[in-house]
Amino acid sequence: MPNNSSAPAPVFYAKNVTKTFGHGKTLVKAVDDVSFSIADGEIVSIVGGSGCGKSVLAKVMLGLYKQNQGEFTYRGKAITDTRSHWNEVQSVFQDPFSCFNQFFSIRSQLKDALNILKVKPSKAEADARVDAGLMAVNITPKDIEGKYPFELSGGQMQRMLLARIFALRPKVLIADEPTSMVDACVRANILDYLMKLKVELGMTIVFVTHDIGLAYYVSDRLFIMHEGKIVESGTPDEVTQHPQSPHTVQLLEDIPEIHKEWLKR
């Protein structure tokens, strides 16, 4: 990373990052020679179709995958301790039910999530943080008391993931297709909660999605991915109004007409 002591290190910095799977003839470059930086407080959307490598790149940011080549840092340092990394960087995934154990109550799991913190909260503080997280996503704590994941809807479970984020208060959130399993009304609510996270916690958000129309509404910058590469990047207006890559054009053609009319304004 460039050495400039007068400027803070970017939240994420990638230089020629490649992540591969398999060997020889079965080798697949899921992320292929990717370079970028993300500044503190930004909302950046990584946009692309299925299999483009966006979720793999998100897992590199989370420290779940280590790049095979290139340089990748978080706030100027390589990710060497995932537990410490997860104190500051948390995620929301597409399927909320896979993120909760069906045999334990929701509240107990929200409290257990606080064990990742370096300084463990007291029982009273843990209860207060969980209650505040639930209230932040418009869930009254008593309404989920004694309930298990299978007793809630998909939309409610997505809100449980976000309640966990409010309770943990990380500095960075990586949201991988967090609205793809819910209807339009719930999707709008979840996006509102994500914006609330940014404002209330001063959070940096990396939004991973196939929907460029959705990304346009929430992002400061867009990264368009195709076959492991970032083929285009820029502000939402730059990317959608003057697309330079045919893959961006295809993503724009795939969005509903109502989004297209809005983008023209």
Image (spheres, rainbow, N blue to C red):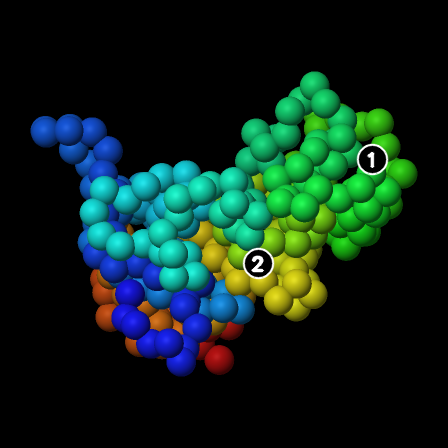
Q: Residue at x 41, y 77 (%)?
A: 7
User: As shown in the figure, which amino acid type bears the numbered disc 2?
Assistant: Lys
Residue occupied by mark 1:
144
Q: Between 168 and 230, which is closer to the camera in this rendering?
A: 168
Q: Between 60 and 124, which is closer to the camera in this rendering?
A: 124
Quadrant of the frame with the N terminus: bottom left
User: Does residue 90 appear in this view?
Assistant: no
Instruction: Say the numbered circle drawn on residue 83.
Output: none
Mark 2 closeness class: few <14, some 14–19, many ≥20 residues within 10 Å? many
Q: Is residue 164 above or below residue 16?
A: above
Q: Between 160 and 73, which is closer to the camera in this rendering?
A: 73
Q: Is residue 259 left or right of residue 18?
A: right
- Tell me residue 100's x, y (percent): 63, 30
- Tell me residue 31's x, y (percent): 26, 47
Residue at the outermost right position: 142
Q: Residue at x 76, y 30 (%)?
A: 108
Q: Is residue 194 left or right of residue 244?
A: right
Residue occupied by mark 2:
171
User: As shown in the figure, which amino acid type bears the numbered disc 1?
Assistant: Ile
Mark 1 closeness class: few <14, some 14–19, many ≥20 residues within 10 Å? some
Say what secondary structure mark 2 lies in.
loop
